Image (spheres, rainbow, N blue to C red):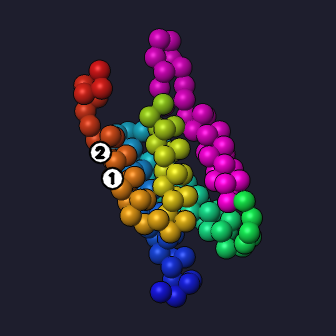
Amino acid sequence: MNFELDMVWRLLLSLALGAAIGYQRERAGKPAGLRTHALICVGAALFTMVGIYAFPGGDLSRMAAGVVTGIGFLGAGAIMRDRDHVIGLTTAASVWAVAGIGVVAGAGMYILASAAAAVILLVLFLPHRLFR
C-alpha cells in the first residue's frame, strides 16, 4: 500500500472508532460526545504517526506518554463532585481510552485498535445494574 494512503487509512480508522464511542456517549446524554471523542482519537493517531515517521530513531514511548498525560489532564476536567456523587468518571475514562485507540491506530495496529473499540463499546452498552 502507498505510504501516504496508509497514513490516511490510520486517520480514518481512528476517526471511525473514536466517533463510534463518542456516539454512544452522546446518546447517553454526556457532554463529551461524538466530535470530542473523534477528535481526540484522530489527534492521538496523528501525534503517534508524527512520532514514528517525523523523528526516526526517537523514543516513541515519550510520544505515547505525552498523549496519556495530556488526555489525563483533559479527562480530569470532566470529573465533578456533587454532594455524595461523583460524576464524569466514565466520560473521563472513555476519553482516555479513545486516546489509547488513537495511539494504537496511528501505530498501524488496525486489529488491536478495532478490538479495543469493540471492548470499550461493550462495556459502555452494558446496563449499570450489571456493575452494582
The vertical placement of 121 against 113, above or below, is: above
Q: Are marks 2 and 1 in contact (CB under 8 Å)?
A: yes
| Residue 23 shows in this picture | no
Indicate the secondary structure of the residue bearing disc 2.
helix
Q: Nearer the viewer, residue 119 or 8?
A: 119
The numbered disc on residue 122 is 2
Between marks 2 and 1, how big is the CA–CA gap? 6 Å
Q: Residue at x 48, y 31 (%)?
A: 88
Residue at horizontal 48 percent and vertical 46 percent from the top? 97
Residue 118's disc number:
1
Residue drawn where x is 42% and y is 39% of the image = 30
Label 2 crowd (10 A; few <14 / some 14-19 / many >=20): few
Q: Where is residue 119 drawn, in percent x and y?
A: 34, 48
Q: For residue 84: magenta? A: yes
Image location of residue 44, percent across then percent down: 58, 58
State which region is magenta. 60-88
Q: Quadrant of residue 55?
A: bottom right
**Side of 75 relative to 120 (left or right):** right
Residue 124 is covered by the magenta coloring: no
How packed mark 1 is, by other alpha carbons closer than 10 Å (few <14, some 14-19, many 20 or more), is: some
